[in-house]
Image (cartoon, rainbow, N blue to C red):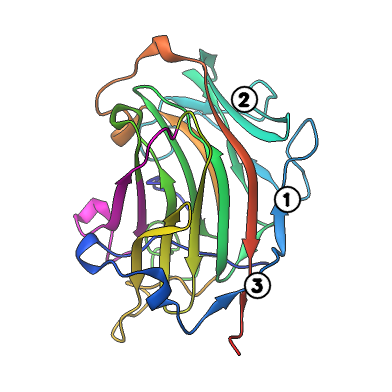
């Protein structure tokens, strides 16, 4: 997510700016992905998310974006039911904040270097909501040992004041929104809050592509001149799923308290490894 913060299967990422976008098929023609996932959660159980696969980020400190939620691990905010992971944001006093939500993290239990990532989800709606499906570096290898030097891949971000517009981005030391060099793209998709869509990333040693329902809308390609400042995407990353409230982007047009509670529902998370093309 465009959060200023920073698992062993494989991964995929957003891509380059609109002018640099290329079809995923052409960029990845020398690579292929396994047809069977090696890491997955189908959420075909009830209760807490599988502790063998997931951790939680907890807290109410704004998360670098002046966000308004407190992240908890309470079942009211995060649970598995009816075959879906449910992340629910509520309007209530929670910690130092006036909203409660959850942020699920695979770090240490699902860390990936390259691969195809598929997450089938239905998004919340309403002004002030900011759901995200994204990835951060699992190790601190480069530069400032944090964000943005070690990289970020945003597979899906959606701000409720701009309904149905889905964003995919990458962030690095050289390319990030803080210095107005961000690489990314967005696309309008019907009914993201009423229907499930598959948000995915295809990550190889040469590119990161972001797709919705199998169609790429952003590809970031590694150029021969790139060093770690442009391309830190050669180390393991992990997955994050969350709903923020307000913040520097999600709160640009305020928060409509009448919309809560809101949910992001996830049908599955699947990671397919990169394989050698024969």
Closer to us: 234 or 201:
201
Who comes first in sequence, dot 3 or dot 2?
3
Which residues are the magenta region? 167-192
Residue 53 tag number: 1
Say few, some or many: other residues with alpha carbon within 10 Å of mark 2 (under 14 / 14 to 19 / 20 or more).
some
Q: Position of residue 205 (x, y in %)?
A: 47, 79
Mark 3 or mark 2: which is in front? 3
Res. 103 in view:
yes
Closer to us: 227 or 44:
44
Residue identifier under label 3: 34
Residue identifier under label 2: 77
Cα–Cα gap, marks 2 and 1: 18 Å
**Residue farthest to the bottom?**
278
Who comes first in sequence, dot 1 or dot 3?
3
Q: Number of numbered discs present? A: 3
Disc 2 vs disc 1: Cβ atoms closer than 8 Å? no
Q: Position of residue 247 (x, y in %)?
A: 34, 31
* Snapshot quadrant of residue 40: bottom right
Res. 152 in view:
no
Quadrant, the C terminus: bottom right
């Amino acid at each position: 997510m465009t959060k200023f913060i920073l698992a062993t299967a494989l991964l995929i990422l957003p891509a380059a700016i609109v002018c640099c976008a290329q079809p995923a098929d052409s960029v990845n023609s020398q690579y292929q992905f396994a047809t069977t996932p090696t890491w997955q959660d189908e959420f075909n159980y009830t209760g807490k998310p599988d502790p063998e696969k997931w951790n939680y980020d907890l807290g109410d400190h704004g998360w670098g974006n002046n966000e308004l939620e407190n992240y908890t691990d309470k079942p009211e905010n995060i649970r598995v039911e009816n075959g879906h992971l449910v992340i629910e944001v509520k309007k209530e006093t929670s910690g130092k904040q006036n909203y409660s939500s959850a942020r699920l993290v695979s770090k240490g239990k699902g860390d990936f270097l390259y691969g195809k990532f598929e997450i089938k989800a239905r998004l919340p709606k309403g002004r002030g909501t900011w759901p995200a499906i994204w990835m951060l570096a699992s190790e601190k290898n480069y530069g400032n040992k944090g964000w943005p030097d070690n990289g970020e891949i945003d597979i899906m971000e959606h701000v409720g004041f701009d309904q149905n517009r889905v964003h995919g981005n990458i962030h690095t030391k050289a390319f990030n929104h803080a210095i107005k060099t961000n690489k990314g793209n967005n696309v309008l998709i019907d009914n993201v809050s009423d229907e499930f869509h598959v948000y995915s990333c295809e990550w190889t040693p040469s590119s990161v592509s972001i797709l919705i329902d199998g169609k790429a809308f952003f590809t970031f390609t590694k150029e021969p001149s790139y060093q770690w400042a442009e391309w830190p995407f050669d180390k393991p990353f992990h997955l994050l799923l969350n709903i923020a409230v307000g913040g520097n982007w999600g709160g640009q047009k305020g928060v409509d308290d009448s919309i809560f509670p809101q949910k992001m529902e996830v049908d599955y998370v699947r990671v397919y490894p990169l394989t050698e093309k024969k």
